[in-house]
């Protein structure tokens, strides 16, 4: 996808379609239509009336310009009332226009930079923020996982260029650099979506590791490296959780270590951990078959880490960033782990397996203990960990837990800005006893109630007491795998976490 910015009036702008954002407020609505009438003539009034266009949120109309503008088609994209204007509204309105344009086989869609924001109030008055939101919404809305549809129409019918224009050169100048950033973030989100959506016969531990290696290889010159442990090395290091979960699978596990700025000794170290269950059948505690196919996406935490690492490297963020991914399938077989088994994790803590379907926490336990070796300033794990989190928060918020309020406040702010929102859930001491085991240090399930919280408590147990670090756990079970389309996120793997973490890391320090 080509992204560009142009100093141009709407009349001059040469694309297949130009799009103008229109607010619903009467006075502003009239002002915008009056403006358009200057280059367009009276026809605009009749079209707006005929289509009953009011500038409401996500409303969209398409008008043939019949030579009045240099571009053959004009979109009016409603953004609703000014008092509710937000970057998110621009993402959505831009997505409406882009999806409509895609259907009409438009190749180049150009957005006029809007000017309604209140600079006192929010970010919608800043051209580079607007540009980011508009291009991001349009770009991401066009995503489709269609590589296996052999009868699909060819790429020639897809939008190939998105651009922004404004008549004022001063507004356009800052956009050039911004567009590079937007491209990086969108491509990283697309990578995460592609990995999530890929079936488990394509993406399994070995191929997930290959994908991570390929990404690092492309960026080796800017200090991005990947190391992959095979089963032997995993055994040698004593990752008992990863090995136990893997024991039912015919495919070997992998442990993937991604590192950006490894040699930057003066830089702060931040560790990202992603759950990499490439298929979760539940194991011996097998899941019901309906909906099981979704569990190919149980490596969405890993996908988010791979996407974020790639973006951080391309953006050359001044941090030492480490990505850790334990990867395995969770399958039943004669050699599979069984309820009642006891595992010894990296670092020595033991856990009793009460339910083999609570496998994510078992593989994360080894890695949370291992992460302390990096002496990190912060550790953030992302995992499609519990159905209970989906029950609590649905698809519109990621569950957040942690041991440091400041770190959580920063993630919350990044979530509001990117609209990958996180919602803190409590880790009160009172929940801890639910995962007490009579025969091991801890049990992998906590009974009927507060399943997202007891899962987080299990993870917390593996942060070494004598080597503690600041930690946040993000339960993305609801937000990573969508069962309905959202404005710029088609159902399936959402790539959640990438935009959130890049925003968070950009503002580190
Ligand atoms: N991968 C699932 C969690 C999940 C459920 C993700 C639904 C996305 C949608 C996880 O491994 C799991 O099976 N968790 C169990 C834990 C239970 C056995 C304590 C669950 O949530 O049911
Ligand atoms: Zn499971
Ligand atoms: Zn799982």
Image (cartoon, helix red, strand yellow):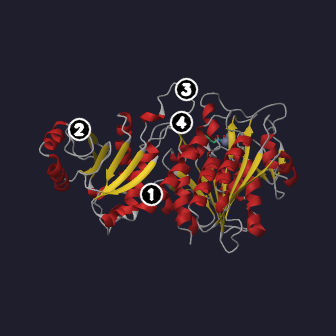
Q: CA distance from mark 1 to mark 4?
A: 24 Å
Q: CA distance from mark 3 to mark 2?
A: 33 Å
Q: Position of residue 398 (x, y in %)?
A: 54, 51
Name the residue that disc number 3 marks.
150
Q: Residue at x 88, y 52 (%)?
A: 236
Which label sits in the foreground, 4 or 3? 3
Position of 499 compared to 281: left or right?
Answer: left
Picture quarter with the C terminus: bottom right
Q: Residue at x 16, y 43 (%)?
A: 44
Q: Which mark is residue 64?
A: 2
Q: Which mark is residue 179?
A: 1
Q: Residues within 10 Å of mark 2 (few under 14, many from 20)?
A: some
Which label sits in the foreground, 1 or 4? 1
**Mark earlier in primary sequence (3, 2):** 2
Q: Residues within 10 Å of mark 1 (few under 14, many from 20)?
A: many
**Mark earlier in primary sequence (3, 1):** 3
> Residue 328 appears in which quarter of the rendering?
top right
Element on which disc 2 rests: strand
**Mark earlier in primary sequence (4, 2):** 2
> Residue 390 appears in which quarter of the rendering?
top right
Q: Which mark is residue 145?
A: 4
Q: Nearer the viewer, residue 335 or 423?
A: 335
Ligand 1: give its quadrant.
top right
């Amino acid at each position: 996808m080509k992204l560009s910015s142009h100093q141009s009036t709407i009349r001059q702008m040469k694309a297949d379609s130009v799009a103008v954002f229109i607010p619903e407020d009467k006075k502003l609505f009239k002002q915008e239509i009056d403006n358009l009438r200057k280059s367009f003539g009276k026809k605009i009034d009749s079209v707006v009336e005929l289509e009953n266009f009011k500038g409401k949120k996500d409303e969209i109309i398409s008008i043939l310009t019949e030579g009045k503008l240099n571009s053959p088609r004009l979109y009016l994209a409603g953004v609703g009332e000014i008092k509710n204007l937000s970057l998110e509204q621009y993402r959505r309105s831009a997505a409406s226009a882009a999806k409509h344009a895609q259907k009409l086989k438009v190749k180049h869609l150009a957005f006029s930079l809007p000017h309604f924001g209140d600079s006192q109030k929010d970010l919608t008055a800043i051209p580079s923020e607007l540009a980011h939101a508009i291009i991001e919404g349009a770009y991401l809305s066009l995503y489709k996982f269609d590589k296996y549809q052999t009868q699909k129409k060819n790429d020639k019918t897809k939008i190939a260029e998105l651009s922004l224009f404004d008549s004022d050169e001063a507004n356009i100048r800052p956009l050039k650099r911004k567009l590079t950033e937007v491209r990086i973030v969108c491509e990283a989100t697309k990578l995460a979506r592609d990995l999530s959506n890929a079936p488990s016969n394509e993406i399994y531990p070995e191929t997930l590791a290959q994908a991570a290696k390929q990404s690092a290889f492309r960026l080796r010159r800017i200090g991005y490296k990947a190391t992959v442990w095979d089963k032997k090395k995993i055994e040698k290091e004593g990752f008992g959780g990863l090995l136990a979960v893997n024991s039912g699978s015919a495919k070997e596990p992998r442990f993937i270590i991604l590192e950006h700025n490894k040699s930057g000794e003066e830089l702060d170290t931040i560790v990202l951990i992603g759950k990499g269950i490439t298929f979760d059948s539940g194991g011996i505690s097998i899941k019901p078959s309906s909906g099981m196919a979704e569990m190919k996406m149980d490596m969405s935490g890993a996908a988010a880490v791979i996407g974020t690492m790639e973006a951080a490297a391309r953006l050359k963020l001044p941090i030492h960033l480490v990505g850790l991914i334990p990867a395995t399938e969770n399958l039943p077989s004669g050699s599979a782990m069984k309820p009642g088994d006891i595992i010894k994790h990296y670092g020595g803590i033991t856990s009793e397996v009460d339910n083999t379907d609570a496998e994510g926490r078992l593989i994360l336990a080894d890695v949370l203990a291992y992460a302390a070796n990096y002496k990190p300033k912060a550790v953030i794990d992302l995992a499609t960990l519990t159905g209970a989190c989906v029950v609590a928060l649905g698809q519109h918020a990621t569950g957040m837990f942690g041991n440091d309020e400041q770190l959580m406040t920063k993630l919350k702010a990044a979530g509001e800005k990117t609209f990958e929102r996180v919602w803190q859930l409590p880790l009160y001491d009172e929940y801890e006893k639910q995962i007490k085991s009579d025969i091991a240090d801890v049990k992998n399930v906590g009974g009927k109630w507060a399943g997202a919280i007891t899962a987080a408590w299990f993870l917390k147990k593996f942060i070494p007491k004598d080597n503690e670090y600041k930690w946040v756990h993000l339960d993305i079970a609801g937000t990573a795998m969508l069962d309905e389309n959202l404005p710029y996120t088609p159902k399936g793997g959402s790539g959640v976490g990438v935009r959130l973490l890049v925003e968070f890391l950009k503002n580190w320090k």
